């Protein structure tokens, strides 16, 4: 069994992908907290995660935007708990990070007075157990879907979601139909649905989602409903489960 | 079997609306039944024959009217009116023939001309009002759709401009660049000076774009170059770029910010997330008719199939609005991994320069 080595010095990991900025942060830390030992410097998220688990530092300074893994992913995925300070050029994630126990949040360019506050805060906390960051939410997941990449032969088209008339399951792909062309996407129908606006797109069967604005005609068939889209000749059946959407109108 | 109960149309507000009257199935069946009845039982009732003729004429003319309204071949109002006139004429003629067949002329109890005239007037009275109303509704719908399309085009252009303005200078880029410049000041003042020079060039080139409808390739490339040189100073061991352009291509015009959007996308989604060395190539070509711009990187390639960014969508919509099908934005996997993004657009004539 491995026994964690005992250190007198507080050890830190510094992850920042731009070498010039890394050197500057290191110099500033050396000035404000000479006892702090920067055990390792890394330039990407994958190395940061590996070194966190290997060297087990007390503190990690993580740039939010890094190659490989983002600083947020590193904090979520690491099995070694330590005090985490996020570094970013733009203040877009601070609140969520604090809510989930980040020790601090630094803005680039680093302000020395602000860094001194961070150092003070870290000195107070460093001997307490660090927060568990595994539940940290990913930033920007609530924005609605605007476009989708679809392949048309060997070309990739950017399709505005509003231009899509219908998504239809097609073997291992999903077929996407617009008024002008049909193309293929890899995302299955069931993963697509939560991304779409419920008022604009209705599921009509297990294998099809249609754009309400693109419906041309709805007809009653023997014991159900069928609909036809604009500029199309084929009829799509509306399964029993999804017919209520049409009835309430 | 599908049974038609009229067609139902959902308009954009989501309400149900009947757009077409039913096919005249009942009159047709009734008239045919009466015809067979009269034929087989040789019933000499003049009122029955007249009624049957009237029903038959109505069925034929109404079918003609609905056919003209629902078939895509009749895509113009005058064609539909022609179709309707032919149907009414056909109905009148077939009624005269039917009448003759069942009721030899010499035995008709009323004047010979009376029946066709009555049938003709009856058809006009029953079908004409609904035909006129349908055409009026159709015309106003078409006008509305035309206005909506025009409005949508204008709105896209405004949205594109707004999005371009908002997304013009990414805060991440700006603050990281300033942070690097400040760090360089104490260690390599010369490089810091160069960095500032590039930043000034980038920002200066950004300013006139806000109003111009078009910009020369040379100007757009200058701005891209300033941006890429900044990235090269910031990521010295990780990033290289090349720009290929002929004098002819540099003189071409293109809508502002399209090239920059492709370059910024390549850096942000392809090169910054990649561990290790990466390259970016810009190639511009002009054959006198089309201008072709390619931005290729060997970064991480396509990561997600969907997104909410507006940059590429805007390029596509602006190209569509300005050039229709003549211009094209395409993205393909690059030869060295990564992404090859290209824009092809017709060369913009200098004379339109406003």
Image (cartoon, coloured by chain):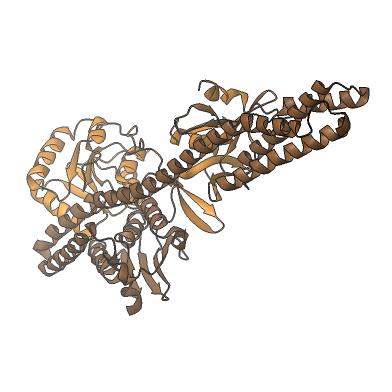
Chain colours: A orange, B brown
In the image, B243 versus B26, the foreground residue is: B26
Q: Quadrant of the N terminus of chain B?
A: top right
> Does residue B103 show up?
yes
Whether residue A214 appears in this view of the structure is no
Q: Is residue A222 above or below residue B351?
A: above
Find residue A232 and report its horizontal and vertical position in percent.
60, 43
Is residue B103 shown above or below A84? above
The image position of residue B25, as x and y in percent, is: 72, 28
Q: Is residue B105 left or right of residue B343?
A: right
Image x and y of residue B130, in percent: 58, 31
Q: Is the C terminus of chain B in the top left, top right, bottom left or bottom right quadrant?
A: bottom left
**Snapshot quadrant of residue B13:** top left
* Left or right of A24 on screen, residue B52: right
Q: Residue at x 30, y 36 (%)?
A: A81
In depth, the one of B160 and B167 nearer the eye is: B160
| Residue at horizontal 59 percent and vertical 32 percent from the top | B20
**Measuring 50% from the left and 35% from the top, which residue is drawn there?**
B137
* Closer-to-camera residue (B332/B151): B151
Residue at 38% over, 49% down: B153
Comparing B244 with A45, the one in front is B244
Residue B82 drawn above or below residue A1:
below
> Seen in the image, is B15 located left or right of residue B153?
right
């Amino acid at each position: 069994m491995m026994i964690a080595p005992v250190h007198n010095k507080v050890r830190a990991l510094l992850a920042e992908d731009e070498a010039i900025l890394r050197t500057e942060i290191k110099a500033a830390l050396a000035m404000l907290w000479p006892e702090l030992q920067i055990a390792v410097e890394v330039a990407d998220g994958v190395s940061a995660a590996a070194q966190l688990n290997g060297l087990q530092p007390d503190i990690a300074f993580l740039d939010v935007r890094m190659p490989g893994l983002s600083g947020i992913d590193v904090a979520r995925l690491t099995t070694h708990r330590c005090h985490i300070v996020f570094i970013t050029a733009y203040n877009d994630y601070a609140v969520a990070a604090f809510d989930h126990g980040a020790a601090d949040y630094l803005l680039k360019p680093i302000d020395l007075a602000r860094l001194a506050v961070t150092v003070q805060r870290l000195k107070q906390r460093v001997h307490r157990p660090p927060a568990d960051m595994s539940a940290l939410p990913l930033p920007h997941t609530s924005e609605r879907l605007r476009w989708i990449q679809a392949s048309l032969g060997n070309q990739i088209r950017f399709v505005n979601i509003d231009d899509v008339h219908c998504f239809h399951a097609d073997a291992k792909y999903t077929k996407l139909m617009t008024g002008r062309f049909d193309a293929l996407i890899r995302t299955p129908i069931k993963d697509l649905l939560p991304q779409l606006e419920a008022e604009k797109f209705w599921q009509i069967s297990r294998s099809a989602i249609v754009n309400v604005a693109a419906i041309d005609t709805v007809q009653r068939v023997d014991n159900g409903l069928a609909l036809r889209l604009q500029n199309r000749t084929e009829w799509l059946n509306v399964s029993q489960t999804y017919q209520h959407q049409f009835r309430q109108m | 079997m599908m049974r038609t109960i009229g067609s139902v149309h959902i308009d954009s507000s989501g309400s149900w609306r009947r757009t077409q009257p039913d096919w005249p199935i009942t009159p047709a069946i009734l008239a045919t039944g009466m015809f067979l009845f009269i034929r087989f039982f040789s019933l000499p009732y003049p009122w029955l024959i007249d009624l049957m003729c009237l029903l038959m004429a109505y069925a034929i003319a109404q079918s003609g009217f609905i056919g003209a309204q629902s078939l895509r071949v009749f895509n113009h109002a005058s064609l539909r009116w022609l179709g309707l006139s032919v149907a009414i004429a056909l109905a009148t003629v077939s009624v005269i023939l039917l009448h003759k067949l069942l009721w030899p002329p010499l035995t008709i109890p009323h004047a010979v001309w009376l029946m066709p005239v009555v049938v003709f007037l009856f058809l006009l009275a029953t079908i004409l009002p609904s035909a006129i109303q349908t055409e009026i509704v159709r015309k106003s719908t078409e006008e509305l759709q035309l206005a909506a399309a025009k409005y949508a085009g204008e709105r896209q252009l405004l949205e594109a401009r707004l999005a371009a303005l908002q997304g013009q200078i990414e805060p991440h880029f700006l603050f990281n660049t300033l942070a690097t410049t400040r760090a360089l000041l104490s260690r390599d003042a010369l490089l810091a000076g160069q960095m500032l020079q590039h930043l000034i060039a980038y920002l200066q080139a950004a300013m006139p774009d806000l109003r111009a409808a078009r910009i020369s390739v040379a100007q757009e490339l200058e701005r891209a170059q300033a941006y890429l040189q900044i990235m090269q100073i910031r990521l010295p061991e990780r990033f290289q770029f090349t720009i290929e352009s002929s004098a002819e291509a540099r003189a071409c015009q293109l809508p502002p910010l399209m090239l920059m959007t492709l370059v910024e996308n390549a850096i942000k989604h392809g090169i910054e997330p990649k561990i290790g060395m990466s390259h970016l190539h810009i190639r511009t070509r002009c054959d006198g008719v089309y201008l072709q711009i390619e931005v290729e990187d060997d970064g991480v390639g396509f990561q997600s199939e969907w997104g909410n960014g507006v940059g590429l969508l805007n390029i596509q919509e602006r190209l569509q609005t300005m050039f229709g099908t003549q211009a094209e934005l395409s993205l393909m996997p690059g030869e060295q991994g990564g992404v090859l993004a290209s824009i092809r657009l017709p060369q913009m004539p200098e004379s339109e320069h406003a």
